[in-house]
Amino acid sequence: MSLYNETKFIMKKYNISANKSLGQNFLIDDEAVSTIVDTAKVTKDDLIIEIGPGLGTLTSKLLEKAGKVIAIELDKKMVLVLEDRFSLYDNFECINEDVLKVDLESLISEEKSKGLKTAKIVANLPYYITTPIIMKLLEEKLDIETITVMIQKEVADRLVAEPGKANTGAITYAINYYTNPKVVLQVPNTAFIPAPDVNSTVIQLEVLQKSKIDVIDEEMFFKVIKYAFMQRRKTLLNSLTNSKILGEKEYIEKMLSELGIEKTIRAENLSLEEFAKIANWIKTKS
Ligand code: SAM
């Protein structure tokens, strides 16, 4: 049966219509499903945490390959479908909860203590909370190897942009600090029912065990990036001055000159290393 027919069949059987406010767009494209699962390189040593499994399209492929799949789904209606659909699998667990509230660290360490070697995140994410979910996964410094997710194309473009080049935002720097990002596949909106208004991209983030750069104080590092991008059209000098993070303009000019950074530069032209230098300077010299 095609994924389209299977999805329609399940929706009819359980009397389900997609809930737009929960970002429910169900994947019906075989190539996208198999590319996501192949890219995640799922093995029997893996704990796969799937966020927003919906009707279980990805889940069913993941269950064949993974040691265990823990699916976290907010919508009780979906959970009932999943529990029925996968009742015969002993490597399936479903948590009916908002993923942002789940203690993923405990979940992972518990499964690892039982013998699973690696934890990976795989998902077709609910687009309305893509950024908070990805930032939670990274900021909590979870013991995970990769994050393979489908997200809205425009968001993907920003996440995988190269620091210092076009199309960056504060989040580009966070992603590049914590991970090696890559684009895996472009997916048109026709690959879902109902079709969303936007196109999608599958990306993979390889989570770094050790950061590429030396940062003395991560909080200060991300604060500087945040303030710099709050007024991205202004020069870095002006946005840092307006943020009052450091003091008077002359003082910031002195810092930039000591660090060999042009005082006319804008946030989007700075490299990850330059932001680290600024944050480290503030931490040690002010
Ligand atoms: N994985 C399915 C697929 O590919 O067909 C469904 C993906 S759909 C884009 C997103 C799913 O995330 C929906 O099932 C939705 O109910 C679920 N969801 C929305 N908000 C959530 C949250 N805060 N925590 C967990 N799941 C959520």
Image (cartoon, grey):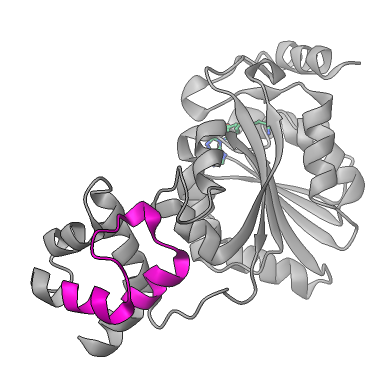
- Where is 43 relative to 200, above or below? below
Magenta stretch holds residue 260: yes
* 2 relative to 65, above or below: above
- Please provide percent x and percent y for residue 132: 45, 48
Residue at 30% x, 82% y is 281
Looking at the picture, how far across and down is residue 212, in whole percent?
Answer: 57, 73
Magenta highlight: main SS? helix
In what quadrant does ligand 1 lie? top right
**Residue 188: where, in percent of width, then height?**
66, 21
Q: Nearer the viewer, residue 217 or 22?
A: 217
Residue 86 visible somewhere in the drawing:
no
What is the residue that sits farthest to the bottom in this orientation?
A: 284
* Residue 184 position by quadrant: top right
Q: Quadrant location of the N terminus?
A: top right
Quadrant containing the C terminus is bottom left
> Vertically, is 130 above or below 163?
above
Q: Which of the pair 116/136 is nearer the observer?
A: 136
- What are the residue bounds of the magenta stretch? 253-279
**What residue is at 33 percent from the left and 76 percent from the top?**
260
- In which quadrant of the rendered view does residue 226 lie? bottom left
Residue 87 placement: quadrant: top right
Location of residue 153 with respect to 120 vertically, above or below:
above
Q: Is 91 left, or right, of 187 in this rendering? A: right
Q: Nearer the viewer, residue 277 or 204?
A: 277
| Residue at left offset 75%, top offset 66% | 111
Within the magenta stretch, is there residue 261?
A: yes
Left or right: 239, with 229 as reference point: left
Q: Position of residue 63 (x, y in %)?
A: 86, 44
